[in-house]
Amino acid sequence: MSWIRVVATTGRGRVRPGNEDTVLVFGWLSQALRPQLVELRAPTTSLPLVCAVADGMGGHAAGEVASTLALTYTAQDYHEWTTADAVRAGLLAINERVYARGAADAWTTGMGTTIAGLIFQARRGICFNIGDSRVHRISDGYVEQISVDHVATEPDGAPTSRLTQSLGEPPDRRLEPHVIEFPLTGEQSRFLICTDGVTSMLRAADFRGLCRRTELDDLVMGLRDAVYEVGADDNLSLIAVDVPGAD
């Protein structure tokens, strides 16, 4: 039997009082304070499967509520997300539900979250994201970002940390989730999903170098430890996934 293997972690970092990130692996949700590594496996006979991260927007009300809601709804609905169009429609529906929950109480008004993840189906995958949490594909030492950052840019084109899209927007605002489909070939595939509490803290060269580590747990541990070494100013979440080759 073939297995999809995952190593994941999430934590509050060194500065934040709580963790506004949430991770989803198959049916497991976590918003842990300490970034302990967790390994999970699932047989390919149980496809489709989902892995995702959500980053409650720092400085906003109830970011931890928004991220947990977004991934709870994702876990409930993703079996129906069989095409890219279905994923887009599903994310728009989740946006309305997160917005409605935020508007229901004064202390949650304005809450929002990013989301980024992968759905694994027979012989293909679907990548999706809203915001600046990222999905990378790692192949033969090459690290490729397959998500798209929804951030404002400076006049010279340099990206900023200001989000242009997030879950929890009023339904009358135009939301355009990034969704792509890709084949799963006969070779093993490796992916990394992470929040910007990882990528914003590390130099691009250091990030790519750590992503080239052979062992899945060593890769996640290396990235986590590197973020802590440079201060871990934000919450951080990582999900590394090995998918066996398709028959």
Image (tube, helix red, strand yellow):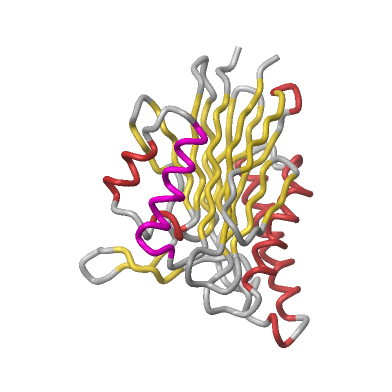
Q: Nearer the viewer, residue 81 or 133?
A: 133
Q: Position of residue 27 (x, y in %)?
A: 75, 43
Identify the residue at image location x=34%, y=54%: 202
Identify the residue at image location x=78%, y=81%: 104
Q: Is residue 107 above or below residue 52?
A: below
Q: Nearer the viewer, residue 221 or 143?
A: 221
Identify the residue at image location x=43%, y=51%: 148
Identify the residue at image location x=68%, y=60%: 70
Q: Position of residue 167 (x, y in %)?
A: 61, 65
Q: Residue furthest bottom?
A: 106
Residue 218 counted in the magenta span? yes
Describe residue 81's horizontal placement relative to residue 199 as left or right: right
Residue 61 counted in the magenta span? no
Q: Quadrant of the N terminus?
A: top right
Segment tinted magenta in the rendering: 216-232
Q: Nearer the viewer, residue 211 or 176?
A: 211
Q: Quadrant of the C terminus?
A: top right
How many numbered marks are there?
Answer: 0
Describe residue 112's horizontal placement relative to residue 28 as left or right: left
Q: Position of residue 50 (x, y in %)?
A: 66, 40
Q: Nearer the viewer, residue 125 or 239?
A: 239
Q: Position of residue 245 (x, y in %)?
A: 55, 18
Q: Main secondary structure of the magenta part?
A: helix
Where, by quadrant of the figure, is residue 26 drawn? top right
Q: Is residue 179 above or below residue 72?
A: above
